[in-house]
Image (cartoon, coloured by chain):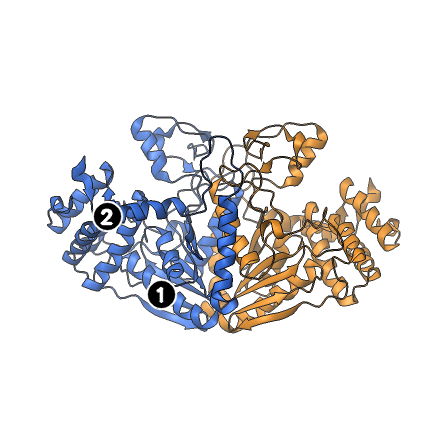
Chain colours: A orange, B blue
Amino acid sequence: MSTRLVTVESLHYFTREALRRLGLSETDAAVAADVLVTTDACGVFTHGTKALAGYLRRLKLGGLCPQGCPHIAGEGGAWATVDGDSSLGMITSTFAMNTAIRKAKEQGVAYVGVRNSCHFGAAGYYAWLAAREGLIGLAMANDIPSVAAPGSRGPITGSNPISYAVPAGRHPPLLLDMSTATVAGGKVYTARTRGERIPDTWLLDGEGKPTTDPSGYPDVGALQPAAGHKGYGISLLIETLSGILTGAGFTWQIGSWMWDDGTKPTKHGAAFLAIKTELVMPAAEFGQRMEALVDEIHAAPRAAGVQRLYVPGEMEWERHAHALRHGIALPDDVVATLKKAAELAGLDLNTIYK
Amino acid sequence: MSTRLVTVESLHYFTREALRRLGLSETDAAVAADVLVTTDACGVFTHGTKALAGYLRRLKLGGLCPQGCPHIAGEGGAWATVDGDSSLGMITSTFAMNTAIRKAKEQGVAYVGVRNSCHFGAAGYYAWLAAREGLIGLAMANDIPSVAAPGSRGPITGSNPISYAVPAGRHPPLLLDMSTATVAGGKVYTARTRGERIPDTWLLDGEGKPTTDPSGYPDVGALQPAAGHKGYGISLLIETLSGILTGAGFTWQIGSWMWDDGTKPTKHGAAFLAIKTELVMPAAEFGQRMEALVDEIHAAPRAAGVQRLYVPGEMEWERHAHALRHGIALPDDVVATLKKAAELAGLDLNTIYK
């Protein structure tokens, strides 16, 4: 399967070129490619270039605007609202996090909300943008309802992801990127495709009862919220900061970037926070304290058979380092949608294999 | 059991008097009493006046300073660090959240970290302080390690609570207050006392394996993090914002307010965020959008046998309203520790019953 091994550079080039052919500027195409390819390099294939074909389709149909220009629609000392102008979610979100970083460098902390966006890919990328510059970053977004509330029959909130990144001295940044559902819908769908049963904590059936049968998903039922009322509660905070306070769509007002009418905007919202720790505590002190926390966890006693204790993001950073050296082994489902992307853009996918 | 029914006012008076007798000013005693009694009125008896005797003991022994004066140790545009001066956690935390509210009113958002604090009671109270003034509030704190990381044998992080409150127009504020463990340690301890088995998602035994036997708790084993790596990941963000960035103690540096040497400070940290939504979006618009979200959830289809779908905090607000009218029915374990509190303060507990 060596034909599916690609370098980070060649996948980046392909993604950039595809987006440019659909009308994006070179700068915007590079920004979006960096989000998607970094995500693949971290091994998070559900949220990387697998989605490229879907974005290209929307760019072609007009629901996404190739020449859209995200801009600040309102702002104050430590906050801003960004109107995405129906640009690709990656472009709007990068602009928004950079705005949060800029403001946090002055005020210590900043909140930037986003409206008129679309699917933004992996939340963790934007949190990392802050950590890369020495700040703590948080990123979150709303999405079409797919997750139940305790007691509901059917979905109430989106899988509303949230992520954070914290610089950790000599260690790579702590990086958590999670949905507020027990598991991503993709896992349920994969089990359905394979004809497998699932744990009864993942899905509710059409009556709102836990089920081990994924065959109805996603047409009936709903994902279960992570840790019940806790995941549900956090998803409503994310909905508030991403959807309500930004003027974006919320819950059923949001369109599916994948399945709904490609000529119309999806009205996704998002929210970004940055904290400039260096204003609060000397950088060296903060770094040493984070290192001590990570070192303590690494040295803690482990259960039988457990080789290592990880801090959030550690696995992903190791995959990322490996990908930079040895390339990315693309799974079949990613290759299949990249073929569609190549068709949509008039490119030859075969040029990217090592 | 009518002797255990108390009015909110009489419990407030008793709590205030007890704290005054241990040397607190009238103002400080009233601030702390409000935190604890509001918590009881919401039915969250694990975090209300049940803890009063423990605080009084520390005030007597010197680990908590009756005349301590929380103050701003460092600040900038949208941030501050508060040194609690070993005051009661309720006093320091109220001061810190009020500082965050003041700064958020100018800058849109603010972060206030706390060091030299102690157990702060229910996180949700402080989030509500912000919501009461029309702001979004978040509150969190670290604590002694009691919760495992995925794969660990023994505790790694505290049960690190986090809460938020969001004003919701004509509805009471959304209010979530959760620990990042699957369940509070108190639930496990209660099962132990009663000789009951527990679900295998609550506790790990001394080898780091899930167990249904609570008999070793809390001497051996560790609580399981809520939703596995998700609860673990969030608890590390809370540790970062509450413990690392504030200069407070973190993980094993923290003392147990209940069990450890009462003559020494516990070094707890905490963190508070406030967002002044009115700077970002007109108050009426934000309120209408929040109402629409809550109304939508209330009207959503329910699973068989489910009478209502709740938004976070709704149950607690209904209990609170009931308590204001009809009094608080104190559980036996709360009455037992209030007796100890009365002894420590030289008061007669019997005066508080209706």
Residue B51 drawn at (x, y percent):
26, 47
Residue A75 drawn at (x, y percent):
55, 72
Q: How many marks?
A: 2
Residue A143 drawn at (x, y percent):
62, 50
Q: In which quadrant of the rendered view does residue B167 lie?
A: bottom left
Badge nearest the viewer, 2 or 1: 1
Question: Which mark is drawn over residue B54?
Answer: 2
The reply to whether residue B339 is visible in this rendering is yes
Above or below, B332 relative to B124: above
Identify the residue shown where x is 74% and y is 47%: A50
- Please tell me whether mark 2 sits on a helix, a strand or a loop: helix
Question: Which mark is drawn over residue B98?
Answer: 1
Identify the residue shown where x is 21% and y is 56%: B62
- How packed mark 2 is, by other alpha carbons closer than 10 Å (few <14, some 14-19, many 20 or more), is many
- Please tell me whether mark 1 sits on a helix, a strand or a loop: helix
Quadrant where the N terminus of chain A is found in the figure: top right
Identify the residue shown where x is 81% and y is 63%: A23
* Identity, as a three-letter code, of the amino acid under mark 1: Asn
- How packed mark 1 is, by other alpha carbons closer than 10 Å (few <14, some 14-19, many 20 or more), is some
Q: Indicate the chain on which mark 1 is placed.
A: B
Would residue A98 appear left or right of A277 to someone viewing this image?
Answer: right
Q: Which badge, 2 or 1, comes first in the chain's sequence?
A: 2
Would residue A125 appear left or right of B106 to someone viewing this image?
Answer: right
Q: Indicate the chain on which mark 2 is placed.
A: B
Q: Label 2 vs label 1: CA separation?
A: 25 Å
Would residue B114 appear left or right of B16 to someone viewing this image?
Answer: right
Residue A277 drawn at (x, y percent):
49, 65
Would residue B223 appear left or right of A226 to someone viewing this image?
Answer: left
The reply to whether residue B218 is visible in this rendering is no
Identify the residue shown where x is 61% and y is 64%: A97
* Identity, as a three-letter code, of the amino acid under mark 2: Gly
